[in-house]
Amino acid sequence: MKVAFFSGPLEYSVCLANALSKHCEVSFYYRIKNAKDRDDSILNALEPAIKKCPINSYRLRDFRNIFSYLKIALRLRNYDIVHIQNGD
């Protein structure tokens, strides 16, 4: 099973994604700005099997994201589950 995991708070999201990776294939989507605002070294704690997918975007509800979101939406067709963990 393939899971697209959209992170919220990085510390919690990394732990949850690591647990999920034991049972399925996980792609970890995260905003670059959120990672840099926090401590992006937490991303090193992700299991090696998890695919890191950085998103270079503005705030979630910003209209300038439309093209980024369209590209991501097209990629989501390849996943069985899309998990969104508490966005901003």
Image (cartoon, rainbow, N blue to C red):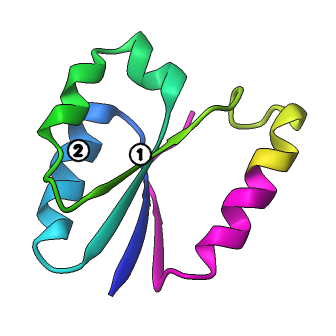
Asked which secondary structure carries label 1, the reply is loop
x%, y% of residue 59? 69, 28
Q: Quadrant of the C terminus?
A: top right
25 is within the stretch colored magenta: no
**Label 2 close to label 1 by CB (< 8 Å):** yes
Is 76 on the left-hand or right-hand side of 11? right
x%, y% of residue 9? 35, 33
Q: Quadrant of residue 65?
A: top right
71 is within the stretch colored magenta: yes
Asked which secondary structure carries label 2, the reply is helix
Location of residue 44 with respect to 67 vertically, above or below: above
x%, y% of residue 62? 82, 31
**Which residue in the structure is indicated by mark 1?**
7
Is 19 on the left-hand or right-hand side of 8? left
Separation of residues labelled 2 and 1 (CA atoms)? 8 Å
Type of amino acid at the residue the image marks with label 2: Val
Q: Quadrant of residue 63?
A: top right
**Which residue in the structure is indicated by mark 2?**
14
Type of amino acid at the residue the image marks with label 1: Ser
Label 2: how many residues lie within 10 Å, few (<14), some (14-19) or many (20+)?
A: many
Is 66 on the left-hand or right-hand side of 13? right
Region of the chain picked out in magenta, as a range: 69-88
